[in-house]
Image (cartoon, helix red, strand yellow):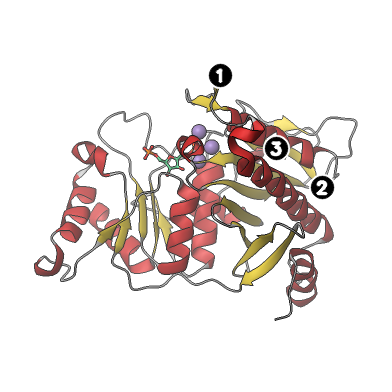
Amino acid sequence: MKRVSLTQYLVEEQRLHNNIPASLRLLIEVVARACKTISHSVGKGALGDILGSADTENIQGEVQKKLDVISNEILLEANEWGGHLAAMASEEMESIHPIPNRYPMGEYMLLFDPLDGSSNIDVNVSIGTIFSVLKAPEGMTAPTEADFMQEGAKQVAAGYAVYGPQTMLVLTTGAGVNCFTLDREMGSWVLTQKNMQIPEETKEFAINMSNQRHWHPPVQRYVSEMLAGKTGPRGKDFNMRWIASMVADVHRILNRGGIFMYPADLRDPSQPGKLRLMYEANPMAFIVEQAGGAATDGRQRILDIPPTKLHQRVPVFLGSRSEVERVTSYHQE
Ligand code: AHG
Ligand code: MN
Ligand code: MN
Ligand code: MN
């Protein structure tokens, strides 16, 4: 089999669809390189002194793991000097990170969840990195948080790396979804799945069931109908999976279908759900839609939500189209 590298894929994609300008290509390659470095650290585990807590808190009140902080620094350092970015924003930083003056300012803005699935780091379960790329507004001179407040539909690229038994990079630039596997010996990303499509038929759902008592009625109804199995309204048995790393759950769904849910619940109306719109829900929604699936907050398309703040949370329902449509319709009744 002829091997196609990430670089070759990006160059040919530009030739074919004219949708990846050179500076965006550089950006994607730099992010991919940073993910390679993170993957290497992840793989070292206890041998690399990367496990355990950093004993600090991020803006969302989560205790940071060492690897949350290390991955954030790797992404910042890798992306600062290339001249392709105007600013960055991250789960692990309270405010945006403009590119320092010593470097030229580029036309893109990068958002990331440097390490997704923090609770799985110390138990050797798959974790990942999620990223989203926006265009800086025309004529912007000094980037502010307001410049980031663009709907997910405006993303020009999004992707994630999953650090599992294999390290993979899943990428969209708005013309389908492709998956690259890291060849660890060669240090290169090799195209291994072209134009991924989420299977429509599914018998699998993902939700943190321990929160059931807090759910709103539409989610109660949707899940209980699945749990009722063959003799229930759905007429089939369902299986459940919950990895507690969004990247790993989404990666499974891209490959074999299913629905992922992190709903809002009755606990705290000021915190609609757990996941963050700008660097978790939006990039994943872009990827899922590009793979033929759907993503909503229970009422509307995630990609149409106008953001109001950087760390805003949002309920998430994504995956096989018909399942997402069903649970969304229950919210609208
Ligand atoms: P992060 O580690 O980046 O803070 O994100 C964790 C998220 C997501 O990856 C996962 O789906 C969810 O938290 C798991 O939440 P529970 O611990 O409530 O299951
Ligand atoms: Mn976190
Ligand atoms: Mn996350
Ligand atoms: Mn994270």
Can you give x and y, in whole percent of width and height, for residue 69 in the image?
63, 29
Mark 1 beta carbon near ligand 2 (under 8 Å): no
For discs 3 and 1, the disc positioned in front in the rendered view: 1
Could you tell me which secondary element the residue under label 2 belongs to? Answer: loop
> Which amino acid type is marked by label 1?
Thr
Q: Nearer the viewer, residue 132 or 31?
A: 31
Gap between marks 3 and 1 measured at Cα? 21 Å
Secondary element at tag 3? strand
Q: Is residue 73 left or right of residue 253?
A: right
**Corner quadrant of residue 140:** top right
Q: Amino acid at mark 3?
A: Met
Up-down relation of residue 150 to residue 295 (above or below):
above
Residue lying at 75% horizontally and 67% vertically, measured from the top left: 5
According to the picture, the residue beneath numbered tag 2 turns out to be 84
Task: Pick the residue in front: 261 or 2.
Answer: 2
**Amino acid of disc 2:** His
Where is the N terminus found, in terms of image quarters? Answer: bottom right
Residue at image mark 1: 56
Please give the name of the residue rendered at 59% of the width and 70% of the height, measured from the top-left corner. 176
Q: Which residue is mark 3?
A: 88
The C terminus sits in image quarter: bottom left
